[in-house]
């Protein structure tokens, strides 16, 4: 595929394996129930749901405390693990730790770029492919 596109050709393929599309595609069209839910460059689609996910553990996680942090677009609580989707992870982390007395039990902080699979699930409301 890369050789063909390097020659100036267009390659179109359909896949359920979104990691493959994330790795190779320049442009992606996401469909659910026969309707287009997103169309554009991979990075643009991923940024629709928040470019980065910040995950951490807390003993007393109250979701409403995190929704107002800069850049946060979505907050999800899984037991004691908080997942924040953010469009500006630097601003979100600065604000989280600037108010450290309020969030003094934050631990095991990890950041990861949103992958295409996560974007698809967010854009389709978690529907099965």
Image (cartoon, rainbow, N blue to C red):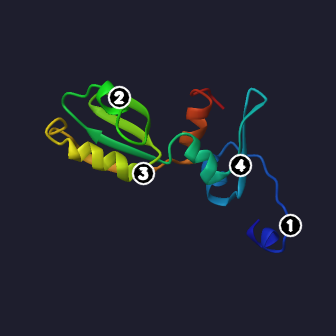
Q: Earlier in the sequence, mark 4 or mark 3?
A: 4
For numbered disc 3, what is the local secondary structure?
Answer: strand
Mark 3 residue crowding within 10 angstroms, few (<14) / some (14–19) / many (20+): few
- Residue placed most toward the observer, 69 or 14: 69
Q: Secondary structure at mark 4?
A: strand
| The quarter of the displayed image where residue 3 is located | bottom right
The percent position of residue 104, horizontal first and vertical second, equals 15, 39
Does residue 63 show up? no
Q: Is residue 104 left or right of residue 119?
A: left
Give x and y (percent) for residue 87: 47, 46
Front position among marks 4 and 3? 4
Q: Which residue is mark 2?
A: 77
Looking at the rendered image, the disc whose residue lies closer to the viewer, 1 or 4, is: 4
Question: CA–CA distance between discs 4 and 2?
Answer: 30 Å
Residue 123: where, in percent of width, then height?
61, 33
Mark number for residue 9?
A: 1
Q: CA distance from mark 2 to mark 3?
A: 17 Å
Q: Which of 16 and 80 lies nearest the eye of the viewer?
A: 80
6 vs 41: above or below = below
Checking the image for residue 40, the label placed there is 4
Residue position for label 3? 112
Label 1, residues with CA under 10 Å away: few <14, some 14-19, many ≥20: few
Label 1: which secondary element: loop
């Amino acid at each position: 595929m890369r050789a063909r596109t390097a020659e100036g050709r267009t390659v179109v393929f359909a896949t359920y394996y979104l990691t493959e599309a994330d790795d190779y595609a320049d442009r992606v069209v996401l469909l659910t129930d026969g309707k287009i839910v997103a169309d554009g460059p991979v990075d643009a689609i991923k940024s629709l749901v928040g470019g980065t996910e910040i995950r951490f553990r807390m003993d007393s996680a109250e979701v409403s405390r995190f929704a107002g942090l800069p850049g946060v677009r979505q907050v999800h609580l899984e037991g004691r693990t908080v997942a924040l989707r953010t469009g500006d992870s630097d601003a979100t982390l600065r604000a989280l730790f600037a108010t450290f007395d309020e969030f003094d039990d934050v631990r095991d902080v990890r950041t990861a770029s949103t992958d295409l699979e996560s974007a698809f699930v967010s854009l389709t409301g978690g529907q099965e492919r």
